[in-house]
């Protein structure tokens, strides 16, 4: 009988160890899960607080954008590799920061068109006939039109250029 008792004693102690290990693992996983949840919830709150600062600045100036259409015009492009003349017929709409900016652009439409003619006539068709080329061109147009219309004037708030017609011949 003593042999039977010795066999049962280690088995009973082993099952207690197994239960303790399982309980410890469950507590450890629960603690890790709780810590992860707290971290993500707390981290998200900090991110929202940091994001609120720029939103508050924008909310003071949050104005519905205005759109100013620029009538279509045709420009001579730089000659291609074969020396042939190429033309660009283009029309676009400017997205500006508000009514005051829209009025300023409309009042200075001759300067807008002049700047665009100078910029566009310096381009090759191969530069602007791809989607990436058009995106780059839009950025260059925005940069040109943000320059003040008057000497020592304020910079224009031109947000985007939206092409409405773009034909290369």
Image (cartoon, rainbow, N blue to C red):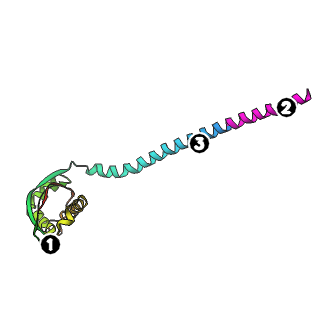
The answer to which quarter of the image holds residue 163 is bottom left
Apparent side of residue 12 relative to residue 80 in the rendered image (left or right): right
For residue 32, the mark is: 3
For residue 82, the mark is: 1
Mark nearer the N terminus (3 vs 2): 2
Relative image position of residue 67 (x, y in whole percent) = 16, 51
Element marked by disc 2: helix
Does residue 12 belong to the magenta stretch? yes
The residue shown at (68%, 36%) is 22
Per the rendered image, the range of residues in magenta is 1-23
Does residue 79 belong to the magenta stretch? no
Relative image position of residue 52 (x, y in whole percent) = 37, 48
Apparent side of residue 96 relative to residue 8 in the rendered image (left or right): left
Q: Is residue 149 above or below residue 68?
A: below
The residue to which callout 2 is attached is: 7
Residue density around tag 2, few if under 14, some if 14–19, many if 20 or more, within 10 Å: few
Mark nearer the N terminus (3 vs 1): 3
């Amino acid at each position: 009988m003593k042999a039977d008792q010795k066999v049962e004693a280690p088995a009973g102690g082993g099952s207690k160890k197994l239960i303790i290990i399982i309980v410890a693992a469950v507590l450890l996983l629960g603690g890790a899960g709780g810590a992860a949840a707290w971290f993500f919830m707390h981290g998200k709150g900090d991110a929202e607080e940091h994001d609120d600062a720029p939103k508050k600045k924008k909310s003071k100036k949050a104005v519905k954008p205005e759109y100013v259409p620029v009538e279509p015009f045709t420009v001579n492009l730089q000659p291609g590799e074969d020396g042939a003349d190429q033309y660009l017929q283009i029309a676009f709409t400017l997205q500006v920061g508000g009514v005051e900016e829209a009025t300023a652009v409309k009042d200075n439409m001759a300067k807008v068109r002049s700047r665009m003619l100078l910029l566009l006539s310096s381009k090759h068709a191969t530069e602007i006939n791809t989607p990436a080329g058009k995106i780059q061109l839009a950025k260059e147009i925005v940069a040109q039109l943000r320059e003040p219309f008057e000497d020592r004037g304020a910079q224009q708030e031109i947000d985007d250029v939206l092409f409405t017609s773009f034909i290369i011949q």
